Image (cartoon, helix red, strand yellow):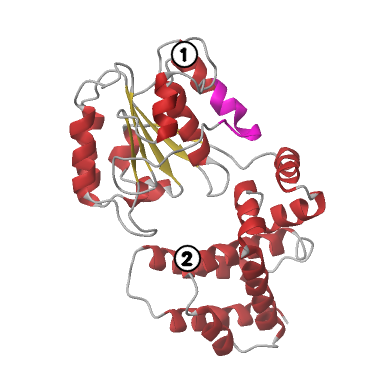
């Protein structure tokens, strides 16, 4: 999605099997006229936040009466599927990791202040909300403080603590938890046609089924497995911290740190569950701090960052011995 008002042609979205409770709550509030003017959906990447937010938006802009989901045949649905519904706006960074700037937010506020062109709801999706900088966040506040009728702002956030507290306080915040393992496995196996691979990949993806599917379809499963093998080599003394850092310096540090934290969690709750190593918790804090530096946009030398982390990683097990 781009930081602009036009949309590409899209398919109608349905909530995923583990999103039934959130979906039912949304429909009940819609039927009872109790929808807020702004919602913030939070959760981990790879569990379907964008999917259910899109389904929310499509249901609001569908003109069919008494329909639980967007009907797919009315004028509103046809406009959405063509990618040119005038009352739907999606704001996202032009490039991953970049900010949502103030001008597109101002354009959105101007659009939301006017009457809906199709005479119904006006809906805006902002994803991820933490990509808004200070100026764009302040520009959004006016709309949150002075909401217009039949207007819904849906903000998606994977790191809600990075969103302005003032914005969070003006939204109805709902968190989507990790799905039930059985439901996620069944869905992934149905989509992929491979139960054994689905179980294995879902574990690697820390229970996040859409992320697991991305691994299976996009080839990043091999990249992640290679990274975890590199972690193991350092741990066992087969690869130096400097050598490992050299292999990591040109990769996506945010993604690698996320993988490292998930690996650490699996290690603590699996292999080392009955033999806890307190040094793991200290190292986990270092990973979180490192990810914070990366996300802050600071000018960090990746080689030095990874060297320090891998030296500390090696010491976790040497101290234990």
- The alpha-carbon separation of the residues under discs 2 and 1 comes to 43 Å
Residue highlighted by disc 1: 64
Is residue 299 visible from the viewing direction of this image?
Answer: yes
Most foreground residue, 269 or 80: 80
Residue highlighted by disc 2: 254
Q: Which of marks 2 and 1 is nearer the N terminus?
A: 1
**Local crowd size for mark 1, using a 10 Å CA cut-off: few (<14), some (14–19), many (≥20):** some
Is 196 drawn above or below residue 141 in the view shown?
below
Most foreground residue, 120 or 52: 120
**Image point 53% across, 49% down: which residue?**
45
Is 92 drawn above or below residue 218 in the view shown?
above
Instruction: Kindly indicate whether the residue at mark 1 contacts the one at mark 2 (C-beta within 8 angstroms).
Output: no
Q: Is mark 2 on a helix, strand or loop?
A: helix
Residue 38 in the image: state x and y as whole percent.
35, 29
Most foreground residue, 317 or 295: 295
Residue 181 in the image: state x and y as whole percent.
72, 43
**Image point 30% across, 19% down: which residue?**
118
Range shown magenta: 14-24
Q: How many labels does the image show?
A: 2
């Amino acid at each position: 999605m781009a930081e602009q008002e036009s949309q590409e042609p899209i398919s109608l979205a349905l909530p995923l099997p583990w999103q039934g409770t959130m979906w039912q709550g949304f429909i009940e509030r819609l039927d009872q006229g109790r929808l807020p003017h702004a919602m913030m959906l939070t959760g981990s990447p790879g569990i379907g936040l964008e999917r259910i937010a899109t389904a929310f938006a499509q249901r609001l802009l569908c003109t069919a009466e008494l329909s639980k989901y967007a009907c797919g045949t009315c004028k509103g649905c046809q406009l959405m599927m063509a990618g040119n519904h005038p009352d739907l706006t999606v704001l996202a960074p032009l490039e991953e990791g970049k900010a949502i700037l103030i001008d597109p937010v101002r354009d959105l506020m101007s659009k939301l202040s006017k009457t809906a062109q199709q005479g119904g709801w006006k809906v805006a999706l902002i994803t991820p909300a933490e990509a808004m900088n200070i100026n764009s966040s302040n520009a959004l506040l006016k709309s949150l403080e002075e909401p217009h009728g039949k207007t819904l702002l849906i903000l998606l956030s994977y790191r809600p603590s990075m969103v302005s507290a003032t914005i969070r306080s003006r939204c109805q915040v709902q968190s989507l938890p990790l799905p039930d393992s059985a439901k996620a496995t069944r869905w992934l196996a149905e989509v992929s046609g491979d139960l054994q691979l689905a179980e294995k990949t879902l574990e690697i993806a820390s229970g996040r089924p859409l992320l697991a599917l991305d691994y299976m379809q996009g080839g990043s499963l091999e990249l992640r497995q290679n990274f975890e093998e590199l972690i193991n080599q350092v741990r066992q003394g087969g690869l130096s911290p400097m050598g490992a850092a050299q292999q990591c310096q040109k990769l996506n540090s945010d993604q690698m740190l996320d993988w490292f934290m998930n690996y650490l969690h699996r290690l603590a709750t699996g292999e080392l569950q009955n033999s806890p190593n307190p040094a793991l918790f200290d190292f986990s804090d270092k990973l979180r701090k490192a990810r914070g530096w990366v996300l802050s946009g600071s000018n960090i030398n990746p080689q030095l960052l990874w060297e320090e982390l891998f030296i500390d990683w090696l010491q976790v097990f040497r101290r234990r011995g």
